[in-house]
């Protein structure tokens, strides 16, 4: 389901954000709190992508061959474990495809036809050793026009921790 736009610069938040009660002492919600700014919308996508990319999915321990629908459901939310992989030995095209599939499946606010994942070449030095850098590019669904999404992601291959940095203009 796509987020609804009300007034050109205010958007309806994702379902999780609408269901989260930030003011439990209040019995009602103010009308202005039902909508978020484009920048808050972008931040919520960044937060949810971080959750997705830092969650190991169930595919490594569960056979989904007979349960294809479960493979693309919240039962399998996340990505395969990246920790412990050798930087030079991994098939990065496979990593790009795996991440693209996970993001397209679990982040509907990014237009799937616009989504591009690219492994960035390693930078010389010890800081980049056992660290994979990625560029995630796409468009966020929004009215009256989509918003640009450009992220840099760094994956620590020793512990599997993924960090995201927004590099697009808000």
Image (spheres, helix red, strand yellow):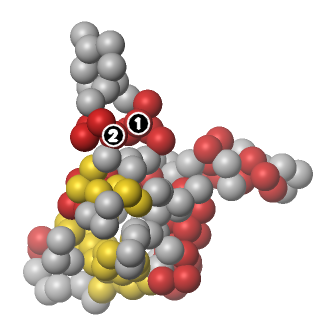
Q: Is residue 150 left or right of residue 146?
A: left
3 left or right of 137? right
Instruction: Specify the quadrant of the image occupied by residue 17.
Output: top left
Disc 1: which residue: 18
Q: Residue at x 61, y 44 (%)?
A: 74
Q: Secondary structure at mark 2?
A: helix
Q: Nearer the viewer, residue 160 or 27?
A: 27
Give residue 56's position: percent from left, percent from top.
Answer: 49, 49
- Please name the residue shown 59% across and 56% down the image: 1
Residue 92 is labelled as none
- The answer to whether the residue labelled 2 contacts the one labelled 1, judged by CB atoms less than 8 Å apart, is yes
Q: Distance from label 2 to label 1 (Cα)?
A: 8 Å
The percent position of residue 143, horizontal first and vertical second, equals 40, 70
Residue at point 75%, 47% (across, down):
70
Please give the residue where the numbered disc 2 appears in the rendered image: 34
Give the residue drawn at x 25%, y 40%: 32
Q: Which mark's residue is nearer the viewer, 2 or 1? A: 2
* Crowd class of label 2 (few under 14; some 14 to 19; many from 20; radius 10 Å): few
> Which residue is at the front of the view, 37 or 165?
37
Q: Is residue 164 visible?
A: no
In the displayed orientation, state which residue is furthest to the right. Answer: 66
Q: Secondary structure at mark 1?
A: helix
Q: Is residue 158 above or below residue 61?
A: below
- 111 relative to 12, above or below: below
Residue 42: which quarter of the image? bottom left
Q: Residues within 10 Å of mark 1 (few under 14, many from 20)?
A: few
Q: How many marks?
A: 2
Where in the figure is residue 129, as x and y percent of width and height? 21, 73
Residue 72 location (% of width, % of height): 68, 55
């Amino acid at each position: 389901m796509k987020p609804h736009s009300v007034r050109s610069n205010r958007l309806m938040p994702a379902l999780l954000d609408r269901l989260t009660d930030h003011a439990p002492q209040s019995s009602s919600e103010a009308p202005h709190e039902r909508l978020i700014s484009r920048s808050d919308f972008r931040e919520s996508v960044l937060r949810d992508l971080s959750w997705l990319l830092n969650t190991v999915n169930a595919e490594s321990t569960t056979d989904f061959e007979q349960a294809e629908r479960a493979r693309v459901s919240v039962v399998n939310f996340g990505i395969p474990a990246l920790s412990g992989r050798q930087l030079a030995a991994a098939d990065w095209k496979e990593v790009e495809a795996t991440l693209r599939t996970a993001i397209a499946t679990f982040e509907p606010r990014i237009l799937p036809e616009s989504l591009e994942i690219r492994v960035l070449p390693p930078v010389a030095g010890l800081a980049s050793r056992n660290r994979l850098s990625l560029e995630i590019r796409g468009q966020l669904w929004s009215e009256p026009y989509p918003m640009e999404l450009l992220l840099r992601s760094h994956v620590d291959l020793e512990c599997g921790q993924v960090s995201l940095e927004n590099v697009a203009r808000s």
